[in-house]
Amino acid sequence: MSTDCTPHGNSDKAGLRRNYLSGYELTFQSIGTVAPSASMALLVPVIFAAAGVGTWLTIAVAGAGILFLAGQMAIFGRRMTSPGALYAYVHAGLGPLPGVVAGGSVLLAYLLFIATIPPQIANLVSGQLYDRFRVPASLELRIGLMTASVLLPWWLARRDIKLSTQATCLIEVATMLLLIVLVSRHFRLQGAWPSRAQLSLHGFTISQFYRGLVLAFLLYGGFETAMELGTEARNPFSVIPRILVTVVGLLTGFFLFMGYGTVGAFEDLHHQLATDISPMTTLAGSMGWNTAGFLVTLGIFSSLMASSVGCINAASRVLYAFAHRGVFFRALAVTHPVYATPHRSIAAVSTVGLGIAVALTVAGVHPLAQLSYIGTMSSISILAAYALVVVAAPCYLKTLGLLRIHHLAGAIVALGFLLLPLVGSVYPVPDYPLDLIPYLYLAVMAAGAGWFLYARHRHPDRLQGMEDELLELPNPASVTVTG
């Protein structure tokens, strides 16, 4: 059975460029936002601290869940585009209020993604400055480095989304290959590959599984950004669903290899992975490969910058969609007269992300602790949005008369995977302050939902306009089902 959907309404009232991004550029944008090399270098110690020898298992389960999720997202991706994709998808299936909650969750997650990056960049650069020139890592220096680390991505995102994608893609791929070579070389020198403790999961507990899984899903955060840029893509209805599956497959293979390999390598070195802020540099140094260590640091820096650009691009499109539809301040619903980018929304999300990072740094929170706290919050936020998309998909298909049993089965499996880390974020009860984060997320979402209801009460005509123009949907009457 196949569906033939003919979308209509291809004019973009929002002012973003149409038919601008190719499939390759969308793929690079998604991979760049995830920043796999930086994720491996920075998140693996945090995941290992939570999951121990089960790190590889949490990554595998997260990858399987994301793959099923990609299938549910593809249901919408074949039929509609919107600058705030997940927000639009949930709106189509469940209505405006759940749509706003999903969009708010995505926006919060992207803002937190942006906020995690400046402290890590400042940590990398200040470490190099101290090692090479004995420059102390003062608070003023760290804040200056964090500010600079946001200004460049802001400029790239404001100027041209193609430029911001092409500027970092090749370096990201080169760094991923270098990390693979680094881990492989370690085991070639050791003369052994299997890690018995990891394969047997000796001492691994269900509590570790849940805690690690919350952070393992964070590895994939941002894989869906190609959908947020669908309005600016060429042939989005055929290209984007393929990109989702391709990106998830590539990322899962890389994350599994690197996660398993890194934990095994640190077992051989008898070194504490959970407290190492630059594990790849440590691994390179253990082999006397200092040049590779420096190149890895340079590549991770570039990867973080690429991720910052990707998160700023994605967050600004969601904020722009909110503003354009009257949910948020209309002043942000403006595109640049030359570059056709949502430059005000780009400036807003960049400023908020930097503000969160600076506030935590001034408060004395260690960069790894920031990664753990903000990472957990952003993971819960994006998982909640993903879960709403999964629930919305069969509801949307039902309105089109296309719902079949395999759609329901796929949605149930995907939702089951997503509920695992969400349940794990509250039970077993995590240590303080991680135990407060789920409730902080609920408070933020309640405030956002309250704002939406207030706006709908004050400006019902504006919100009705949002209903009319939100989605570029196929006319249900034009959808034919052939057997």
Image (spheres, rainbow, N blue to C red):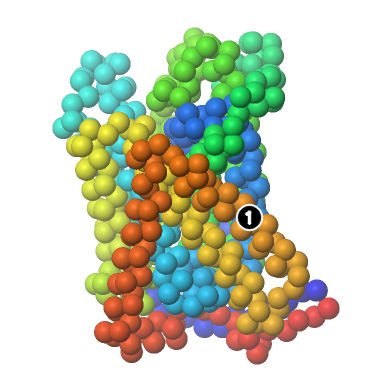
Image location of residue 358, percent across then percent down: 23, 42
Instruction: Locate the N terminus by quadrant.
Output: bottom right
Point out the residue furthest to the left here. 140
* 337 on left or right of 191: left
* 390 on left or right of 109: right
Residue 212 sits above or below residue 385 on the image: above
Point out the residue furthest to the front here. 428
Q: Residue at x 30, y 84 (%)?
A: 457
* 356 on left or right of 164: left
Q: Residue at x 27, y 69 (%)?
A: 332
Image location of residue 104, percent across then percent down: 39, 63
Point out the residue furthest to the right here. 483
Residue 44 sits above or below residue 342 on the image: above
Amino acid type, label 1: Gly
Q: Residue at x 61, y 24 (%)?
A: 203
Callout 1: SS: helix
| Residue receiving disc 1 | 416
Instruction: Locate the C terminus by quadrant.
Output: bottom right
> Which residue is nearer to you in this view: 117 or 394?
394
Image location of residue 295, percent across then percent down: 45, 25
Q: Residue at x 61, y 75 (%)?
A: 395
Image location of residue 285, percent across then percent down: 47, 13
